[in-house]
Amino acid sequence: MKLIFQLAWRFRSSKQQNGYISFISASSTVGIALGCFVLILLLSVMNGFERELKDRLLSIIPHGELYAVGKQGITDWQKEIAALEKDARIESIQPYTKATGMLQKGKKMKAIELVGIDPQFAENDGMLSSVAKQQWQTFSNDPQGVLLGAGAMDKLGIELGDKVKLLLPQLSDDLSIRAPKTLWLNVLGEVKIGGELDNHIGYMHLPLASKTLGVTHGVQGLRFRYHDPFAAPLITREIGFGFSQEVYMSDWTRTQGHLYQDIQLVRVVVYITLILVIGVACFNIVSTLVMAVNEKQSEIAMLKTMGTTEQKIILVFMLQGFINGIIGTVIGVTCGVLMALNLTSVAQGIERLTGFHFLSGDIYFINFLPSALKWHEVYITAFIALALTIIATVYPARKAASVNPAEVLGH
């Protein structure tokens, strides 16, 4: 085995080697390194977005919702909550009533979706972690209080302590539109979730919302948080089909699922594209070794006349190509890991230097470039790169083993 390694290294580093062969060999190593580096980095970014989606957005919005078909609301909702809390998959349950209308401040108006909540349930749920503690306490003590998204407050020019008018549409029995209901609310806090949600969401007190909308049973629906948010579609439908009355069912994948689907789609596209890039770089090794075999035919013939077997010749050239793959993979994986671990800091440094922001908090639910390295993806990337390298060396190595000493040395 030592002889095989020495021969492979000698053939690879031979000073007589054609300059073009050296260039192709170096380009294949650089291609493998670059492919591994970019693949690990982009997968880490996708993992970071998925982590932030789960830790930030899904810590605020409900994972699942059941809301009554009839206007009266959920019957005996306290008993329903008590029964459902026994389900180990459910982390918390919160009653709610949703009011959709127009929010008015002076001459400015904006569509808004106010969710009526019970402060006690909301505190246990942790869904309002984005609200300052003092603002939350003030809101809890004022039945006419409202918490508004930061984007909505900014667009209407609302300050803390202002009074705003809520206009709620009404339909008559013949479905004709009547004059809207009006409700004055005190702005006591600001909700910062991130992205578009900040522009059209707010919270008010549950009794006031239910009374205003005529929900006689006190709550319009129930909001759920699950220990595994990605199981929300299955669990929500299971609970909904077994519920004691007719309800509509919804979960976060219907309202915000496009974010998760986009992340998964980009992950798949990135994986396929960069594996192909690594594959192309690996198969440059084929060109390198084929040219090396043609150049080293006399040396191969001499080795065979000295008793070297075809299997050893195959191993020599496979190892010669594999060395390129190892060097490229080690460099690419090392750089990819280091960059993925420090990507957020590097990106913030670039933003400070250039004044350019990669992500806008007004559009996305985060305003920084996240990264989360998963070591099993690093191992898979390295394994694929090395496996493709080995596959690429098989043909030229067999071609080297088929050299006929009599033909080569006879010339």
Image: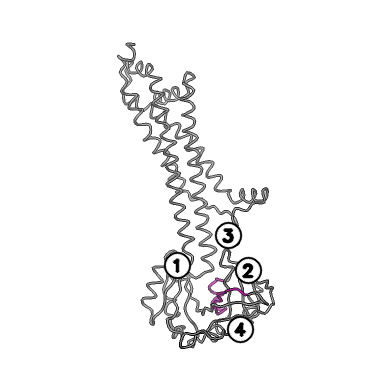
Image x and y of residue 229, in percent = 46, 65
Left or right of 122: which side holds 353? right
Q: Which residue is labeled 4 in the image?
A: 183
Most foreground residue, 226 or 287: 287
Which amino acid type is marked by label 3?
Ile
Which amino acid type is marked by label 4?
Leu
What residue is rendered at 44% in x and 81% in y? 68
Image x and y of residue 325, in percent = 44, 34
What is the spatial separation of the Cα atoms under label 2 and label 3, in whole angstroms? 14 Å
Q: Is residue 172 magenta?
A: no
What is the spatial separation of the Cα atoms under label 2 and label 1, in whole angstroms? 24 Å
Left or right of 117: which side holds 4? left
Question: Which residue, as the protein is rendered here, is positioned at the far top?
Answer: 410
Q: Earlier in the sequence, mark 2 or mark 4?
A: 2
Q: Vertical placement of 392 versus 84: above or below?
A: above
Q: Are marks 2 and 1 in contact (CB under 8 Å)?
A: no
Which amino acid type is marked by label 2?
Ala
Most foreground residue, 231 or 219: 219
Query: Could you tell me which secondary element the residue under label 1 belongs to?
Result: helix
Q: Vertical placement of 141 versus 341: above or below?
A: below
What residue is rendered at 49% in x and 46% in y? 40
Q: What mark, if any, has residue 366 been given in the picture?
A: 3
Instruction: Please state the extent of the stretch shown in magenta in the rendering.
Output: 109-127
Image x and y of residue 39, in percent = 48, 45
Q: Which residue is labeled 2 in the image?
A: 150
